[in-house]
Image (cartoon, helix red, strand yellow):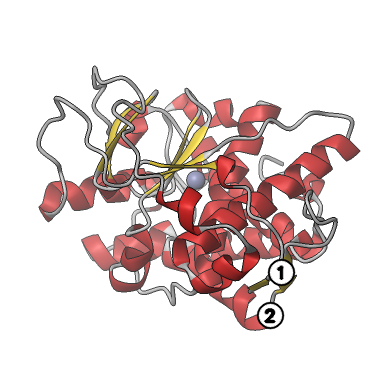
Amino acid sequence: MQFDDDAGLDTSEVQDVRGSRIPGGRATVGGGVAGLIALLLGLFFGVGPDQLGLSSGDEEPGASASSLAQVQQTCRTGRDANTKDDCRIVAVVNSVQDYWAQEFERRGGTYTRSPTVFFSERVGTACGTATSAVGPFYCPGDRKVYLDLGFFDELRTTFGSSGGPFAQAYVVAHEYGHHVQDLTGTLDRSQDGRTGADSNAVRVELQADCYAGVWAHHATTTKDESTGRPLITSLTEADIRDGMDAAAAVGDDRIQERFQGRVTPESWTHGSAAQRQQWFHQGYRTGDMARCDTFR
Ligand SMILES: [Zn+2]
């Protein structure tokens, strides 16, 4: 994945609160069994505090953002995105949202841009207080994507994914898939509390994978609003394999096999490795969100 060196990055789409502390916060659930369980529960979840296992903290969302605002200082151009991990995520957020804004407009609708919050350790959200252990997630309460960049190391070490640049892009695009679902009204369908291979929860997750694929299809042709040229100038077959690999690594069956030694489809919340790959690929192949009807 390569970015146009000369394109300007829009850092207003990222809120960088890494290193800031939430006052009055409780002890961090960082590791051990509790951390792992929270991670499994929350991984790639798009939804509210119950399923995320978040505490309904009394902290204000985004409190004490005495932000170092690192990305605002260091991520200025596509050249930065080509060389720095956090700047690359900024560029992916820009590209994904440019795509959906243009696609909604084409369909006569309006896309509302939603920021990604970079945090470390723990963060206050409208969905409660989250620790890094829950993995990346989308909070419908404040319509923000939350991401601890340390998760991408986990993707490699804990989940055995290649974790390359496009694996990271897939994760970001998946979370924005939930934002799109929030705007179109399908996200609510995951809230019936059911799990299992045929559950609405799984269908919503697979649709977000498909939407990630739809963006990937258009990634090199979506025009950047500042330059009028595509921000992403090249995406290779190896990149796509990276994304497919990550989609499989976070499949429920893979995770269950790895961590509980057996596969129990009735407790699935996100879909199997094969399903996740299949829906990502369906989106990538067709480039059409109408082909992402996982409820059919
Ligand atoms: Zn998800």
Image height of 243 relative to 286, above or below? below
| N-terminal-most mark, 1 or 2 | 1
Regarding mark 2 in the picture, which secondary structure is present there?
loop
Q: Position of residue 45 (x, y in %)?
A: 43, 42
**Which residue is farthest top?**
58
Give the distance between the C-alpha atoms of the residues marked 1 and 2, in whole angstroms.
15 Å
Q: Amino acid at mark 1?
A: Asp
Q: Quadrant of residue 108?
A: top right
- Quadrant in which the N terminus appears: bottom right
Regarding mark 1 in the picture, which secondary structure is present there?
loop
Q: Which residue is mark 1?
A: 4
The residue that appears at 78% across and 60% down in the rendered structure is 218
Q: Position of residue 160 (x, y in %)?
A: 35, 74
**Which residue is farthest front?**
73
Label 1: few (<14), some (14–19) or many (≥20) C-alpha neighbours in 10 Å: many
Q: Quadrant of residue 228?
A: bottom right
The residue that appears at 43% across and 32% down in the rendered structure is 194
The residue that appears at 53% across and 29% down in the rendered structure is 143
Image height of 115 relative to 243, above or below? above
Q: Which mark is residue 236?
A: 2
Residue 16 in sight here: yes
Q: Amino acid at mark 2?
A: Thr
